[in-house]
Amino acid sequence: MPARSVPSHLFFLTQPKGNGAILFSMLGTPRGPELSKIGTFEDRDESQLLTLTLNAALQGGAGALAKVHRCSASLPGPLRRAITDIAEEIEDANGDTPRAQAARRTARAVMESLGQRNAAAFSLFSATDCGSCPNCDCTVDEDCASCAVCDSSLRGRGCEDCSGVGVTPRTAFVLHRQLRDLADKTYLAAYDPDFWEDSVPVSAEAQSNWFLLHCARAYDDLAADLLAGGIPVPHCLAESVLLGHAVNSIGGFNIESVCADEVYQTLPASRFDHDWEFLANESRLLDVSDRAHDFLEEDVTEEDLWEEWFKPYTDVEPRSTTHGFRC
């Protein structure tokens, strides 16, 4: 079977229609971006969930394609087939690494250029593991909070069936805000020599402004991982160090203002929210390498860290180096 071309879908969006919505795809054409109607949904919430899941799939979000298939399974025949065809195009591109990289870079660039926070993508993260416990009848809505089987005194971590929840929607939102805030401050530190606010570990404070610019972009790349519906995965030592610095500094972060954010309030709450100790140590979902911990614990390092910090890891897909820096 001949290989298909790179999917021309750049971004998915909806337009309200009564109680439902119309789903569109922004397509890349020789004449420029064009909108193409995919289908009409009777349930607006259903269309929104599928839209953000499709956008996450375009950007390589972990598990996003599987969720697209789950979300579309109950749709009417023609609409289900249209969504299935789109999912197959994305999946086909994912089987070819160069094509997948190009498609993901394009999708992420479009989202960023449109100024889309796509914060609803945080709802792709799990707020609970309820429904998978064979020992009780708790439901997702109940969140196992009052379950006699689950050890609520340990916030659910004492139950082997319910302790798998890691980064929750609200946790993802807070971490994303922290990464973007640190990126903003690092850009300022690079452009303004009179500005400094500990936006990078002290081990990197003696590095050049060019070094700081790349650190700021690394923060942005890690934040973009969350907008794609996935847990940030460091692609080099710099990203490992900076992710560790972001998680460690959340304690001093103005958490109250973030929790008061309207978007944060719309995300599902979980008893596992903000469990940074579990994420960084017990589950190791946000843990970083021993070498990264060395830099997090060291005082100022005088030598040039460029070659070691920004050398790509060999076991992950490399980041794009063509998207430049924020001004």
Image (spheres, helix red, strand yellow):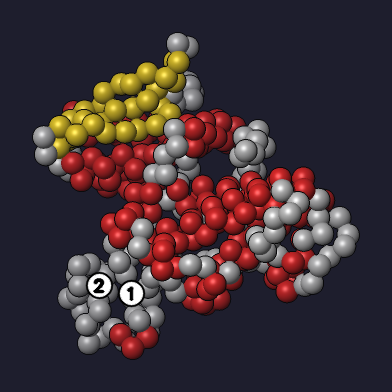
Three-letter code, disc 2: Asp
Q: Position of residue 175 (x, y in %)?
A: 49, 61
Numbered circle sitting on residue 251: none
Q: Position of residue 133 (x, y in %)?
A: 27, 74
Q: Position of residue 230 (x, y in %)?
A: 46, 53
Name the residue nearer the viewer: 76 or 114: 114
For the residues bearing labels 2 and 1, Cβ distance under 8 angstroms: yes
Q: In this orientation, does residue 1 appear?
A: no
Answer few, some or many: residues within 10 Å of disc 2's Cα (few below 14, many 20 plus, some between 14 and 19): some
Say if 23 sits above or below 242 in the image.
Answer: above
Which is in the foreground here, disc 2 or disc 1?
A: 1
Relative placement, left or right, of 130 versus 180 is left
What residue sits 65% from the left and 43% below the top? 318
Secondary element under disc 2, as helix, strand or loop, is: loop
* 3D distance between C-alphas at marks 2 and 1: 8 Å
Quarter of the figure that contains the N terminus: top left
Say if 94 sits above or below 24 in the image.
Answer: below
Say if 20 sits above or below 189 in the image.
Answer: above
Residue that carries the numbered disc 2 in the rendered image: 143
Three-letter code, disc 1: Arg
Furthest toward the front, the residue is: 194
Residue that carries the numbered disc 1 in the rendered image: 271
What residue sits 20% from the left and 67% below the top? 141
Say if 212 sits above or below 269 in the image.
Answer: above
What residue sits 42% from the left and 39% below the top? 116
